[in-house]
Image (cartoon, grey):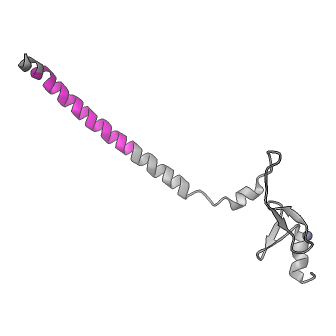
Amino acid sequence: MGTRYNRFFGPMRDAVMRWLFWFLLLLAVVWWVRRRFFAQEGASRPGGEGGRAQRRRGAAGEAEPMVQCAHCGVFVPASEAVSAGGRTFCCVAHREEFARGGG
Ligand SMILES: [Zn+2]
């Protein structure tokens, strides 16, 4: 009975093995393409410093770092502060005055 078993399942097992080979190959290609795509997406993402500053405060009570104006000393949220030359100011007017040396 062993002979009949092999005659029937021999070719079938061969086909299954071939199908499994192509399936694994396809799986490897899909995995490789996906990994490549995601790596590219992460690399080409622009540094979100500029975009994050423009984002409005939606959630109430969201913690935001406070910075001090170099001209008048008032504290303002980092997103609303005006920065120039490594210093931060509460508004453009104070930045201009500080640059003029009025301070
Ligand atoms: Zn100021």
Query: How far from the left and from the top, in percent, is residue 10?
Result: 13, 26
Percent from the top left, x then y, of residue 22? 28, 37
- Dividing the image into 4 quarters, which one contains the N terminus? top left
View extreme (top): residue: 1
> Is residue 4 located in the magenta-colored stretch of the structure?
no
Q: Kindly indicate the quadrant of the structure image that contains residue 98.
A: bottom right
- Give residue 59's position: percent from left, percent from top: 79, 45
Mainly helix, strand or loop, the magenta region? helix
Residue 64 placement, left or right of 69 = left
The C terminus: image quadrant: bottom right
The residue under the point 8% across, 17% down is 4
User: Which quarter of the figure has residue 64?
Assistant: bottom right
Residue furthest bottom in the image: 101
Given residues 96 and 76, the one toward you in this image is 76
Q: Residue at x 80, y 46 (%)?
A: 58
Asked if residue 10 lies left or right of residue 27, the reply is left
Q: Position of residue 92 (x, y in %)?
A: 88, 69
Q: Quadrant of ligand 1?
A: bottom right
**Magenta span:** 6-30
93 in relation to 99, above or below: above
| Left or right of 49 in this view: 58 | right
Label tally:
0
Residue 24: in magenta span: yes
Where is 59 relative to 17, above or below? below
